[in-house]
Image: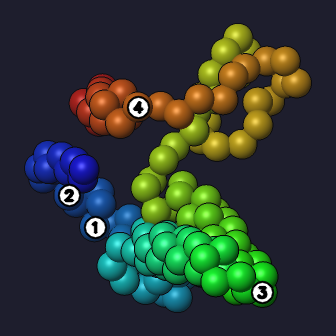
Amino acid sequence: MHLEVDVPLSEHEQRLLEQIERALVDDDPKFASTVRTGDRRQKARRAMQLGALLIVVGLAGLIGGVAVPNVPLGVVGFLLMFGGLTLGVLNYKSATGAVEVVSGPGAPNRTAGRPSRPGGGKVRRQPLKDRLEERFRRRYDQ
């Protein structure tokens, strides 16, 4: 499920955004062109799709290796499944835009990573609804 919230920017916000874009292009044109080119998550999504395909092909190879007594086919099938699973797991966060928030006593809100203190905070995923509400509040509090 893909949820998109379209909230129009005020004229002041649009001007600020245009100024930031111009400054970015002036400072680092290569980075600006990289960021400007489409969906940043598309590469990770394709890697996840490839991982799912590898899992299916690997499962077929594993079952084929068991059905026809062929050990190398079964081993190759297992390795394909393992590789597909690894590819999916490594690209999950980038493909879905999942954000981990560090919270707890003495730990500031920040994305991803470990708590700032060894015992000072739990890492949990913040629900999409909460992220959208927080973004909405920050936008109108400024």
Cα distance between the residues tagged 1 and 4: 30 Å
Residue 74 point in image, percent of width and height: 71, 78
Label whose residue precedes the other's in the sequence (1 or 4): 1
As rendered, which of 123 and 103 lies closer to the eye? 123
Q: Vertical placement of 122 versus 92: above or below?
A: above
The answer to whether marks 1 and 4 mark residues whose Cβ atoms lie closer than 8 Å is: no
Amino acid marked by disc 2: Gln
As rendered, which of 90 and 9 lies closer to the eye? 90
Circle 2: element type: helix
Q: Vertical placement of 92 versus 113: above or below?
A: below
Which of discs 4 and 3 lies nearer the camera? The answer is 3
Cα distance between the residues tagged 3 and 2: 60 Å
Cα distance between the residues tagged 4 and 3: 44 Å
Cα distance between the residues tagged 1 and 3: 59 Å
Give the label on residue 14, or none: 2
Which of discs 1 and 3 lies nearer the camera? The answer is 3
The answer to whether marks 4 and 2 mark residues whose Cβ atoms lie closer than 8 Å is: no
Give the crowd class for mark 4: few <14, some 14-19, many >=20 residues within 10 Å: few
The answer to whether marks 2 and 1 mark residues whose Cβ atoms lie closer than 8 Å is: yes
Give the crowd class for mark 3: few <14, some 14-19, many >=20 residues within 10 Å: few
Tell me the residue that label 4 is attached to: 127
Q: Along the horizontal axis of the image, is 70 left or right of 11?
A: right
- Residue at position x 79%, y 18% in the image: 120
Quadrant of the rendered image containing residue 88 = bottom right
Label whose residue precedes the other's in the sequence (1 or 3): 1
- Residue at position x 73%, y 15% in the image: 106
Tell me the residue that label 1 is attached to: 18
Give the crowd class for mark 1: few <14, some 14-19, many >=20 residues within 10 Å: few
Tell me the residue that label 3 is attached to: 72
Cα distance between the residues tagged 2 and 1: 6 Å
Amino acid marked by disc 3: Pro
